[in-house]
Image (cartoon, grey):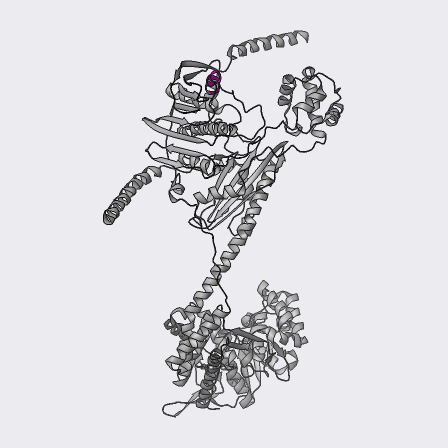
Amino acid sequence: MSKAEQNTEVIKEIKTLAQSVYKTIRDGKSPQLSMPLRSLLNVTYDPKEGFFELMGKEKRRTLTASTIRTFAQTLLLMKESKAVVETDDIMTKREAYYVSKNWGDARFNEQPESDAVMDDIEAMMQTNREQLGFIPEEKGGEVAGNLVVIETDPETKQKIEHDCTRYVSGAYSIPSSVEDLKFKTSAKFILDIETAGMFQRLVKHKYWKSANCILVSMGGVPTRACRRFIRRLNDELKLPVYVFTDGDPYGYLNIYRTLKVGSGNAAHINKYFCVPNAKFIGVTPQDIIDYKLPTHPLKDVDVKRVKDGMKNDPFVQHYKEWQKALNQLVTMKKRAEQQAFAAHDLNYVISKYLPEKLKNEKTWLP
Amino acid sequence: MTQIKLAETEQHQTKAHELAKKQREISVAEFFEKNRHLLGFDNKRKALLTAIKEAVDNSLDACEEARILPEISVEIIEMGDERYRVIIEDNGPGIVKAQVPNIFAKLLYGSKFHSLKQSRGQQGIGISAAALYGQLTTGRPIKITSKISPKNPAYYFELSLDTQNNKPIVVKQEEIEWKKDHGIHIELDLEGIYQKGPQSVDAYLKQTAIINPHATIIYTNPKPEQLIFPRVTDQLPTEPKEIKPHPYGIEVGMLIKMLSWTESRTLQSFFTTEFARVGPGTAKEICNKAGILPNHNPREVNRDQAERLLKAMREVKIIAPPTDCISPIGAEDLKKGLKKEINAEFYAATTRPPAVYRGNPFVIECAVAYGGDQPSEEPVRVLRFANRVPLLYQQGGCGSTDAIIQTAWRNYGLSQSKDSIPVGPCTIVVHMASVWVPFTSEAKEAIAHYPEIIKEIKLALQECGRELARYTNKKRKYSDELQKRSYIEKYIPHVGLALEGILGLKKSDREEMEKELREILERTRGELEELGEENEEYDEEFARIGAKEESEEAADTEAEAEEKPKKKKKAKDESEEGKA
């Protein structure tokens, strides 16, 4: 679907929703807006599908005196979205919050309020917010290595090529919308890295060249754009995706799990915004032992995160391997950062760890 | 050994002799001087209040006993240099000529100490202590006029106290003309300080009027401003009955006194005639338990035997004393009095059934007034009364305060931190009526902490509290509802604008839609019930009396306050001119 077609589709959808609200009122009834419940409680995991899928629990908002404020805000933000899409413009989440300052009594007092309403609209329309013209503040992630990204200037229709091998320092930034990008590569795999520090080390020593790969720095939990970008590389170029994070529950359950199967909060769009084929190469709890890594004690929040995961996360519940790994970590009461390899040698990761790990599939986690 | 002992004894004797030189009778004046705080004369401000309070309490007691609707006038005249003349006049039964000197100029002389009956006075110490205080601070005698009936002449006395011997000295005595049918007129000069505020004479008289709706009080303060508190009911309170003491409420000293006074010849008859709820069977049981024959002569009971009797009295099971001797104000009258004072939205009052502490029957009454003009960020106002007398001092040391603190007011819609008085727009009234109110001191300022009393007060407060909670809940729902309704008005236009923007509606369509939406939303909300009661009793002038804060600031605020009425008056004059 082209961008223009997509825009027409979104506008049509907004109008349909508004029309149904209008008609219900004219029929003398209280209008309702319904949206999927966005939470881990409302997702299932099926490895055949490969992502968190909605179970169909719905949140229904009937227009009453208590809900009228949020109801009005939802409709007003839909109106703003329509205007933005019609002019093919964008609006950041922060800007949306400021735009609301023109709404008088209905304005948002804090950005979290406008973010929540935005998430509601997104879920209600089963689209992602970029399609509605809303873009997040944060950058999508950085790329270096054997990849050429091609985009078209909408004004001049000229093709612009970004060769990701040509960055000496710095890297290609993943834009907030990646749907219209085209790719060219001869790489054999993609390596997704949690921290910018590790990414820089690998770029500095041109690890992508020796390993013939594409390096992506996620900078913590990957953004939707980053997830979508990797997914498209995986889908269209058939490149395997390996993930390299810190050896702690945050790296496992927040970063890797979100990249692979999506999140509870964005469950309605997980289908497109996750990378089911991703594999976890490290740092695993066993790596901490095998590579004699310097460690830090596990914090209370880490233990809590593991417990929550065991109890509520359908992904963890599905994989015995992950349960075993998480239990191992909790028993060890230790965690290790990916940069801990520097204790052996600054370039130990490049010379020893990554080559060994990439060769030995048995040491990975699903 | 013996020698040493002897020496010791001798030494003791000489010590004793030495001590004996210092031992002499303590005069009442000295006693008073040392214990004036116990009697309510600890400072000049309080002294003025106490003197008036003692006289007014006596007048009210006397009127009720004689079944006369009280009409009392109180006047304070400033004589300069912290000296005041206090004039109190009532329409009571008067006092017979022979008794006047004893009642007004002899400490510990009165009719009330020996009887168990609900009355304001207890000891027979109050008014004579006031007279003594006046005498000590100004050197002037107290002046009394008494008349007992239209047929009798009025007698005028000038009395002072022989402070060495606690005997009255009649300075002057004469027959005079007095137009009144009967009553007492007291004139007393004393050192004092007149100030407004919650512990002032003004506040005392106002609260007295609240709790005695059958009395008319005419009050002239030194400003001079005249305030009239007219009676709101012609119904005299039911006359409290005098009862005999209950065996459970007696101390050993009292028992010994009673044994020596009694006319009974046997212990058995002593118990059955002098005590409440003791029949021949119970009397015998007490004697048996004490190991003394029932036909033993009471006057021959020694101290040891008395103690055994007392122990036996406490051990024997005896039914509770009669409780019909108490005359409470009644929930309705209490509410009425409160409405006059406080412009609130909600009032509740309750009268508990009689209960007993230490063999003394008592009744607790409570009332609350909530909302209206009362400040919501401050601790609640507490009005305490005992036998229809306002208690203005020592709130912190009062059993009623403890009971208020121990009550969980948060359940009733007030905020309250641990171990403190609740905070909120509320006034709490506690009244204890009893044949014997246990005060923590002779100044009668705070109720003692008997568990039975605190429990009853708490029960009464809880009864009021439950009613209050019903109201505060309703009020909260009401304000939520109002909030929601204002939401509807506020946000409907935004729904309209948004839909108009998205769908490109015509203005008329949008307006139609907004109208329909308003109907839909209001349909589901239903009727809004009006809350709060109309208070027709409220009297703004009345409420202001005694409301001013006490402290040094008082002087400043008074200066300001004087400015304001002038301006007001001016405005009033002008408006009247306008009318003319």
The quarter of the displayed image where residue B277 is located: top right
Q: Percent x, y for residue B231? A: 44, 37
Q: Is residue B102 magenta?
A: yes
In x, y percent, where is residue B481?
48, 63
Whether residue A30 appears in this view of the structure is yes
Q: Is residue A363 magenta?
A: no
User: What x and y, as percent, mark residue A140?
Assistant: 47, 79
Residue ranking furthest to the front: B151
Viewer-nearest residue: B51 or B393? B51
- Position of residue A344 relative to residue B322, above or below, is below
Closer to us: A111 or B508: B508
Q: Is residue A322 left or right of residue A224?
A: right
Asked if B127 appears above or below B381 in the picture, the reply is above
Give coordinates of residue A109: x percent, y percent: 42, 67
Using the image, determine if residue B145 lies above or below residue B352: above
Q: What residue is rendered at 48% in x and 19% in y?
A: B96
State left or right for residue A157 relative to residue B465: left
* The C terminus of chain A: image quadrant: bottom right
Q: Nearer the viewer, residue B161 or B24?
A: B161
Residue A212 visible, this angle = no
The residue range painted magenta reads B95-103
**What type of secondary structure mainly makes up the magenta span?**
helix
How many marks the image carries: the answer is 0
